[in-house]
Image (tube, rainbow, N blue to C red):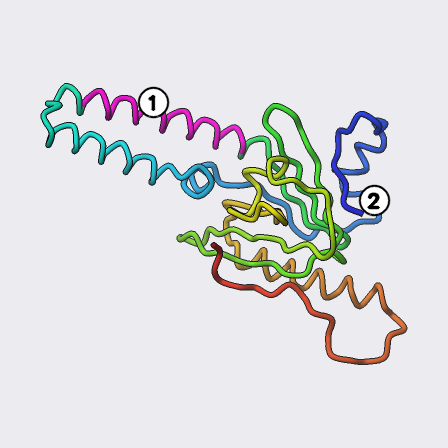
Amino acid sequence: AMSEGRGPLLSASQAETLWRPQADEAVLWQGAPDAMVLARTAFRTPVIAGYFALLAAIAILFGGGLGGAALTLLAGAAVMAILSAIAFVSARTTRYILTDRRIILHVGMAIEKTINLPLAKIGAADLADRGHGYGEIALEVIGGHSLGYLLLWPHARPWRFSHPQPMMRGLADAATVAERLAKAVAAHNRIERPDAKPAPATPTPTIEGALA
């Protein structure tokens, strides 16, 4: 089942088991978000920069003068610096791990959380290209789960509040990661049903190229 680490009812050994791959698990890939890409995609820094630039232009056009525009741009720079710092800390405190059994998301800036997603629960992996080889992979979880949007954010697919989808963000060579994930899920499904008659392959994570 999906689990969250560092809960009050977990012993130290249980918490260790949740977020560290075990001796009989094969680690297929591990990585972390790129801070700049995370700032751009999760914290929307280009949108924020454009917003303050627009406010500065309006200040000049409607009589606010250069002083008002300068103050607006200064405020915008401060906000950008804060968001970039948060993105940097978020990237530094995040670890994504893909094993032959599960995906582990070890996240959390102030409070560390570990989210375990068994490969059997992954129905689709939606890949979004963010340029220069970077991308994001949203994970569609089969069945019900208790993962809240706020628990996952910023590692959550945008606007999916009713059924949140975990998202691995700011990945370098994201297409390769998505391909490894698809192969891992396919291999896991074959191992889970070794006595099944040959049939069309169990649906593996589809690698789709667009996110909302």
Front of the two marks 2 and 1: 1
- Where residue 32 appears, x then y in whole percent? 57, 41
User: What residue would you read off at disc 2?
Assistant: 23
Q: Quadrant of residue 4?
A: top right
- Where residue 44 appears, x then y in whole percent? 40, 39
Secondary structure beneath dot 2 equals: loop
Near mark 2 (Cα within 10 A), the count class, few <14, some 14-19 or many ≥20, is few
70 above or below 126? above
Asked if marks 2 and 1 touch (Cβ < 8 Å), the reply is no
Secondary structure beneath dot 1 equals: helix
166 above or below 190? above
178 above or below 90? below
96 above or below 199? above
Q: Is residue 76 left or right of residue 32?
A: left
Q: Is residue 79 magenta?
A: yes
Most common SS among magenta residues: helix
- Where residue 125 appears, x then y in whole percent? 60, 58
Q: Amino acid at mark 2?
A: Ala
Near mark 1 (Cα within 10 A), the count class, few <14, some 14-19 or many ≥20, is few
Q: Is residue 11 left or right of residue 54?
A: right
Q: Is residue 73 magenta?
A: yes
User: What residue would you read off at disc 1?
Assistant: 78
Which residue is depicted at the point 62% across and 30% down? 108
Report the magenta residues as a range. Answer: 70-90
Which residue is depicted at the point 44% across and 43% down? 41
Q: Is residue 200 left or right of residue 109?
A: right
Q: Amino acid at mark 1?
A: Ala
Outermost residue, right direction? Answer: 195
Which residue is depicted at the point 28% across and 38% down? 50
Which residue is depicted at the point 30% across and 27% down? 76
